[in-house]
Amino acid sequence: MRTMLRMARLVDRLNDGAGQVAIWCVLLSCLISAGNASIRYTFSWSSNAWLEIQWYLFAYLVMLGAAQTLRRNEHVRVDVLYGRFAPRTKAWVDLVGLIVFLIPVTALLAWMSWPLFREAWVSGEYSGNAGGLIRWPAKLALPLGFALLTLQGLGEIVKRVGYLRGLHRMDTQYERPLQ
């Protein structure tokens, strides 16, 4: 179990790095958007490539940020009763949700999205828009993001089991979003 907990910490560090990339995607997307708007209104010139690169960056922001969000326990959840549960009950609810819902869905989506990326890579697919970009970088975001989310889900399962066995300390505090 201790070895698995060490592996879960490695997954945490991997997704910390992916989260940092997601943060940079936000900044780059904002800078490109501002630059594109400035050039378009100042010089009446623009390119679809500037719009598409923003979409690509947004895809990476979402897909790389999802695993980090799960790691930090800041993901969306149905909080009808969860906030009132005891810490062990929360761990059990998380464990069941991760095993029954998250892992099967994210693993399936990673597996199903891989051929989409591979086909775009092999064919050298380009956007149909004038001045558009190659498509494979955007399509790579799907299997990569879902794979990272699956790995993080597996790491969270290990941490919950470790917590339930008394081998891992875990912050079970969940702050319900303000409404």
Image (cartoon, rainbow, N blue to C red):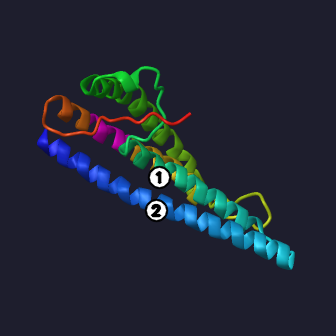
Q: Which residue is mark 2?
A: 21
Of the 4 image quadrants, the one containing the N terminus is top left
Tell me the residue at 72%/67% (across/down): 49
Q: Is residue 144 above or below residue 27?
A: above
Spatial CA span between label 2 and label 1? 7 Å
Answer whether residue 44 is magenta in the image.
no
Q: Which residues are magenta?
A: 150-157
Tell me the residue at 33%/36% (across/down): 173
Q: Amino acid at mark 1?
A: Leu
Q: Amino acid at mark 2?
A: Val
Secondary structure under the numbered disc 2 in the rendered image: helix
Check the image and name the residue furthest to the front: 178
**Percent position of residue 148, x then y:** 40, 48
Q: Which residue is mark 1?
A: 64
Q: Residues within 10 Å of mark 1 (few under 14, many from 20)?
A: many
> Left or right: where does residue 155 sit relative to residue 22?
left
> Left or right: where does residue 168 sit relative to residue 149?
left
